[in-house]
Image (tube, grey):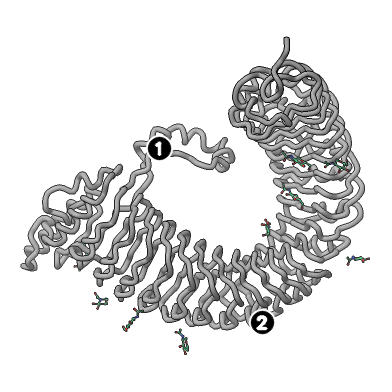
Amino acid sequence: MVSWLLPFAAFVAIVAVIEGTKISSGGMCHPSDLKGLTSFRANVRVDTSGRLAKWTGIKCCEWEGISCDNSTGRVIEIRLPGFISTSDSPYQSQMKGLLSPYITLLRSLEVIDLGGLMDLSGAIPSSIGFDLPNLRKLYLCSNRITGQIPNSIGKLLKLEELVLFENRLSGTIPPSLGNLENLSSLLLYSNQLSGKLPNSLANLTSLVHIDIHGNYLAGDIPENVGRLQNLKELDLSNNLLSGKIPTSISNLTAISTLYLDANNLEGPIPNSLHEMPSLGFLRLQNNRLSGNIPPAFGNIASLQRVSLANNKLTGAIPPSIGYLSALTELYLDGNLLSGHIPRSIGHLSGLLVLNISYNAIQGQLPREMSSLQNLQILDLSFNRLNLSSIPTWFSQLSSLSKIYMAGCGIKGKFPRLLWMMPSLVQELDLSANHITGGLPSWLGSLTQLYLLNLSRNSLVSGIPETFASLSTLAILDLHSNKLTGSIECVLRSPTYIDLSDNRFSDGTEMIGLGAECGIRYLNLSNNSLEGRLPDSIASCILMKSFDVSSNELGFNLPVGLASISSLETLKLQRNRLTGNIPKDYLKLRKLRVLDLSDNLLVGEIPAGEPLSDFPESSFSGNKGLCGKPLPPCRF
Ligand SMILES: *[C@@H]1O[C@H](CO)[C@@H](O)[C@H](O)[C@H]1NC(C)=O
Ligand SMILES: *[C@@H]1O[C@H](CO)[C@@H](O)[C@H](O)[C@H]1NC(C)=O
Ligand SMILES: *[C@@H]1O[C@H](CO)[C@@H](O)[C@H](O)[C@H]1NC(C)=O
Ligand SMILES: *[C@@H]1O[C@H](CO)[C@@H](O)[C@H](O)[C@H]1NC(C)=O
Ligand SMILES: *[C@@H]1O[C@H](CO)[C@@H](O)[C@H](O)[C@H]1NC(C)=O
Ligand SMILES: *[C@@H]1O[C@H](CO)[C@@H](O)[C@H](O)[C@H]1NC(C)=O
Ligand SMILES: *[C@@H]1O[C@H](CO)[C@@H](O)[C@H](O)[C@H]1NC(C)=O
Ligand SMILES: *[C@@H]1O[C@H](CO)[C@@H](O)[C@H](O)[C@H]1NC(C)=O
Ligand SMILES: *[C@@H]1O[C@H](CO)[C@@H](O)[C@H](O)[C@H]1NC(C)=O
């Protein structure tokens, strides 16, 4: 930063001399600007980036993060975004080595602490509005700025960009912002702002981007919002906004992105929406919108991605939908939509994703759907489709890789049609249907399979050995069928395995054997499993939940289990497990759910957390357990 600012300052000085203007050479700044910046610095409590420490002397135009106008010498920009350090983090070099093999592991971590967050803490001083009247851009995003946005911001009449996202600002948005006639970007997202959206914002006809998502804004969207004729992006998602979507919104003729999702909006989707000629991205999901999808919805020819999911929309999907020739993603799931899927849907040749799950849509599926040659993800689950079988034209859907048809009334043997699919199936959910017969061994040839959910059917067979070759399978859910035999060949690859409510009889001694155990969730409850739990289970170090309740397992509790420090849920009740509870189980510090009841365990429950914190019911019904929380042992 500093290295390019210096020649810049020299250039300013030369220009000043040549043009004979009144600016002082070398980035000297106007006394008022200096005062404003000094009081800004004084309000910053902590600056882990060290940038403000270098704000010394009076040449404020040379300071890091400050830009001045060449000709007037006045401060026009403050740019002090917080950032993640790229050089100082002690984790940096480790991360490089880690990233590729453990990328999936990292993705599922909830918090990655990179240690080197560089930012400012403090408040924006009210004096900013008085001392820096020439400011055009104020960038303080991704810091830890607290307090309110000062009302005096409304005095910065030249302000064009106010960029304060990802801070901890609270209070209301000051109505004085309505004075900033040249404001084009208002980016306040991810703060803790509350109160109503000020009506005065509608006076800011220069606004191009408004993004205030992720705050606590309440009340209505101002009815006069339609006056923002230059608005291209309006993101008010993830707030507490209520009331109806104002009909004037259709006056936003320049808008391309409209995100109002995750609020409490109610009432209908305005009929006039089709008058918005540039609308490309529309998100209204997770509200309480009711009524029909407007009949002329399909006239918004520019629409590319639409979500109306999780509302209370009723009626049929309007046939006009077929005119949306630019549409790539359509989410209508979680509404009360009924009727049939219109034939016109076949015209949506660019459609990649279609989710109409959880509605009351009826069959048959129109044959025209076979023209959806780019469709990759299709979710038809839980409607009133009553399909009986998967239509044969499915095999023409040449891009389909994620197929969700749960609760679609599919009957008979496992649909062989899926073997003929021209595409590589990655996710297949046929749960809650009436599929009978066995698991076909050709399923093992779906080598890209990542998720397989066949739960709640009537499948009777063993797991074909070919399943062992499903090396990318991560999620396997076969619960509530009548499957038998060994579970061994599915213990390798998946991280989520639910085989509960079946009739499996063996394979538990293989848990944790083999190259690497990546299992996080394993549910074998309510089967007929016999044999023992092996100490090799110790290698499943990522396991959070392990349930083998209601089986016929015998032998001692495996000591190896004690080294799974991530374990949160352990359910071994209703088996025939014998011996003592290993003392090492006291190492399971993350355990939240424990059930060892109804076994043949004996001896003292090892004293201490977490074991003695569980209720008696976690240990009841055994042959001879004693000690806290059960009555004391009598030796
Ligand atoms: C200010 O200086 C920059 C180069 O440093 C130049 O690109 C820009 O046009 C100048 N602006 C004015 C208003 O003179
Ligand atoms: C707003 O911008 C216009 C055009 O750049 C300019 O003429 C006007 O002076 C600006 N308004 C203020 C208050 O600076
Ligand atoms: C909008 O601007 C007009 C005049 O420019 C003014 O009369 C009105 O009070 C302003 N509205 C709000 C809500 O600030
Ligand atoms: C929307 O536009 C129409 C016609 O252009 C106009 O009559 C109406 O007043 C506008 N509404 C708002 C709120 O700007
Ligand atoms: C479709 O929508 C449902 C309900 O909102 C959701 O649970 C499901 O994950 C979505 N399907 C896909 C494939 O994303
Ligand atoms: C489902 O379809 C079958 C014929 O395919 C029919 O016999 C049955 O009554 C239908 N069930 C419902 C609930 O509509
Ligand atoms: C599999 O489908 C069932 C029923 O449709 C559902 O409850 C379950 O959560 C699904 N399993 C996974 C792992 O998504
Ligand atoms: C256990 O599985 C049987 C079928 O194997 C089923 O009938 C029963 O409801 C299941 N019990 C529980 C508690 O899920
Ligand atoms: C395991 O599956 C059974 C039956 O499907 C279910 O009742 C139980 O809650 C599951 N256990 C865990 C830990 O999720």
CB atoms at circles 1 and 2 under 8 Å apart?
Answer: no
Picture quadrant where residue 400 is located: bottom right
Q: Please, what is the three-letter code of the amino acid marked with disc 1?
A: Gly
Residue depicted at x 46% and y 70%: 234
Q: Determine the CA span between mark 1 and mark 2.
A: 53 Å
Three-letter amino acid code at the position of disc 2: Pro
Residue denoted by label 1:
115
Q: Which residue is mark 2?
A: 295
**Side (left or right) of 262 relative to 594:** left
Quadrant containing ligand 8 reads top right
The label number, if any, that marks residue 266 in the structure image: none
Give the camera-side residue of 368 and 603: 603
Placement of 605 over or under 44, stated as above or below: above
Q: Position of residue 150 (x, y in %)?
A: 29, 62
Q: Quadrant of residue 211?
A: bottom left
Q: How many labels sit on residues?
A: 2
Q: Position of residue 472 (x, y in %)?
A: 69, 41
Position of residue 365 relative to residue 450, above or below, is below
Q: How many C-alpha atoms fall within 10 Å of the one at disc 2: few (<14), some, or many (≥20)?
A: some
Is 425 placed above or below 590 here? below
Q: Crowdedness of circle 1 by 10 Å Cα count: few (<14), some, many (20+)?
A: few
Residue at left offset 60%, top offset 76%: 267
**Residue placed most toward the observer, 536 or 222:** 222
Relative image position of residue 192 (x, y in whole percent): 42, 57
